[in-house]
Amino acid sequence: MTPEAVVPVKHVSDLAFVVAASRAVESIRQDARFYDPYAELLAGEHGRVLQSRFPRFEVMEWLMALRTAALDELILKLVASGVDTVVNLAAGLDARPYRLNLPPNLIWLEADLAPLMEYKANRLIGFSPSCQLRRIKIDLTDEEARRGFFREIDEHATATLVITEGLLPCLERRVVSTLADELRQGKTFTWWLMDMISPALIGHLRELWREGLRDGGLELPFDMAEGPSFFSRYQWHLTVFRSFEDESRDSGRLPPTCTALERTALLHSLAGSGIALFQTPAQGARKTRFNPPARKL
């Protein structure tokens, strides 16, 4: 793909449109891992343009299918176990409060930049979430605003699940460290669900999408080189790990690459990448009944 054909991701919010477009594509497949009837609406024209010109979009769609399906399953299990508040940090154009069968008394908080939250609210006028949804307009890199948001959650929640889907690789290491410490200090922040991307996969994606990311000034600075041990120093302990390699193999969804060499390289880079569920000994931990066997790295 030539540089002229690429629409660069100029802002981190653009990635939300790319992800929504990928979920829309997945939802019309006969072998879809999930169904998101709102994805196409949310992606809009901007998402369709990015889809058509983003380097190797089919790889994005494949990874999002693996990621989304695994997260959906774990979220539903955690909510059934007693989680009463879900906090989706950098929620983007995620539509889980609308498309998942969630308890009507569940509190679901979406936090992201104001323009994205306003766009999303406008696109979803006329649709109703299955739970109690609140949208929080916030710059998550603003430490004072973030800490105030977390304190407010602690005042009302009992057992809180935090989701950082796609967020951590876009942050600087020091910001991830501060975030992990802040969440650990919360009285009700019991569970933390994230996609863990290995340095090998980060490097592969940087190379694969270099025109769309770097030319737009967006990097993926946090490569999770230390794996779960990075989070354990903040008393976040790995409980479940769903590797993308296993998800790909078990679902029969192999990487959509052009050559055998590319496919081998991408599969090799998946080692250590997947969906990770961490738990910390918050007060709310006593309020949940989710105690699965750990699937380790």
Image (cartoon, grey):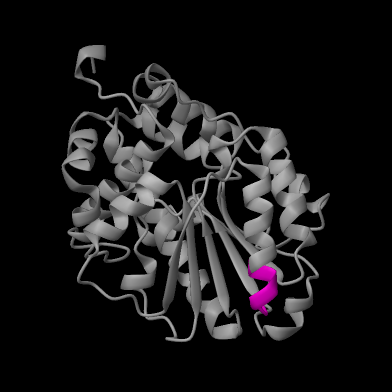
Q: Is residue 250 left or right of residue 233?
A: left
Q: Residue at x 30, y 59 (%)?
A: 121
| Extreme residue in the top direction | 3
Q: Nearer the viewer, residue 165 or 244?
A: 165
Q: Is residue 69 above or below residue 12?
A: below
To which quarter of the image does residue 54 belong? Answer: top left
Q: Residue at x 73, y 39 (%)?
A: 226
Q: Residue at x 45, y 54 (%)?
A: 91
Q: Is residue 89 above or below residue 172?
A: below
Q: Is residue 19 above or below residue 57?
A: below
Q: Is residue 111 left or right of residue 230?
A: left
Residue 65, given in percent of the width and then of the height, sits at 35, 54
Q: Nearer the viewer, residue 265 or 195?
A: 195
Is residue 128 in the magenta section?
no
**Numbered label tally:** 0
Q: Report if residue 63 is visible in the image.
A: no
Q: Quadrant of the N terminus?
A: top left
Residue 70, given in percent of the width and then of the height, sits at 46, 63
Is residue 154 in the magenta section?
yes
Q: Nearer the viewer, residue 178 or 62?
A: 178
Q: Is residue 121 left or right of residue 28?
A: right
Q: Residue at x 37, y 58 (%)?
A: 94
Q: Report if residue 71 is visible in the image.
A: yes
Q: Nearer the viewer, residue 142 or 182?
A: 142
Q: Is residue 266 above or below residue 111?
A: above
Residue 3, given in percent of the width and then of the height, sits at 26, 13
Residue 203, given in percent of the width and then of the height, sits at 53, 27
For the magenta stretch, what is the residue range?
A: 153-159
To which quarter of the image does residue 133 belong? Answer: bottom left
